Amino acid sequence: MNVQELQKLTESMDGWLTAREGEFLYNAAKNCPKGTVIVEIGSWKGKSTVWLGNGSKEGNSVRIYAIDPHTGSSEHKKKFGKVWTFEEFKRNVKKAKVDDIVTPLVKTSEAASRNWNKKIGFLWIDGAHEYEMVLLDYKIWEPHLVDGGVIAFHDSQDKGPKKVVNRYLYFGNKFKGTGFIEGITYAKKTAGVSMGEKLWNFYVLFLTTIYSFVGKLPIPKPVKIIGNKVVKLLQ
């Protein structure tokens, strides 16, 4: 299934992933190396999982482990009350014909990490957004990410994810090649970060700060679209 077909398929699926963000996940999964797996923390109803699954099938067909207790995060419970999303998750994954490559783990991120022994090529963190929870997800899963593997955070301008992203991606010593696409910030794991790579990380942090500030201004939508294209060219 190509990107255009996926956009059409997923536009009716419940979730907070944009088409551009979905395309990023598709390409990240497509480029995931053989001998590794994809770990998704926070699946909700499977919208992001569908993008990942189709991208993986276009690449090396690496398996996706979709981790979510399906009872909702604290934000979801405040908004929706009692939550159970697993049935709709299964329907969406099956409809997209990626159920053969997706292994759902209906448990918390922490519970799923116990006795984990697989190498991760792409780590997608989109669970609970409180700082302590994002930090926990990062600390228990990052050690399994291979050198050259990609980590990505959703809603990375939200307070909790932003704090983790700033500390470990922009100012840390394990990641290079940072970039962002709308609400996603991503980077590639490396054994060491050169001065030039650090400067690049700081440059992208500067761009995200400007992007976030401008995004809050009452600017017409066509101007924002042009701005997004300019930001893309600058990375």
Image (cartoon, rainbow, N blue to C red):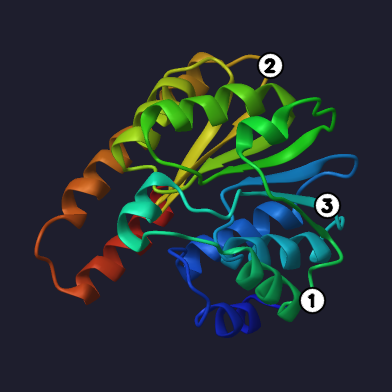
Amino acid type for the residue under numbered disc 1: Lys
Q: CA distance from mark 1 to mark 3?
A: 14 Å
Determine which of the numbered discs, if any, sits on residue 84 in the image.
none
Q: Relative to residue 133, is residue 182 depicted above or below?
A: below
> Residue 115: image x %, image y %?
81, 25
Asked whether 126 or 211 is in front, the reply is 126
Q: Relative to residue 163, is residue 155 depicted above or below?
A: below
> Residue 36: image x %, image y %?
84, 40
Q: Nearer the viewer, mark 1 or mark 2?
A: 1
Q: Quadrant of residue 110?
A: top right
Residue at point 32%, 43% (across, down): 157
Amino acid type for the residue under numbered disc 3: Arg
Mark 1 or mark 2, earlier in chain:
1
> Residue 143: image x %, image y %?
69, 21
Q: Nearer the viewer, mark 2 or mark 3?
A: 3
Residue at point 76%, 75% (across, down): 94
SS at mark 3?
A: loop
Residue designated by label 2: 191
Classed neighbour count for the residue bearing mark 2: other residues with Cα under 10 Å, few (<14), some (14–19), many (≥20)? few
Task: Judge from the rendering whether residue 143 lies leftward or rightward of residue 70; answer left or right.
Answer: right
Q: Quadrant of residue 122?
A: top right
Mark 1 or mark 3, earlier in chain:
3
SS at mark 1?
A: loop
Please say if the residues under marks 2 and 3 sit with CB atoms less than 8 Å apart.
no
Q: CA distance from mark 2 to mark 3?
A: 25 Å
Q: CA distance from mark 1 to mark 2?
A: 37 Å
Task: Judge from the rendering whether residue 133 lies leftward or rightward of residue 94; answer left or right.
Answer: left
Classed neighbour count for the residue bearing mark 1: other residues with Cα under 10 Å, few (<14), some (14–19), many (≥20)? some
Residue designated by label 1: 97
SS at mark 2?
A: loop
Determine which of the numbered discs, if any, sits on residue 63 in the image.
3
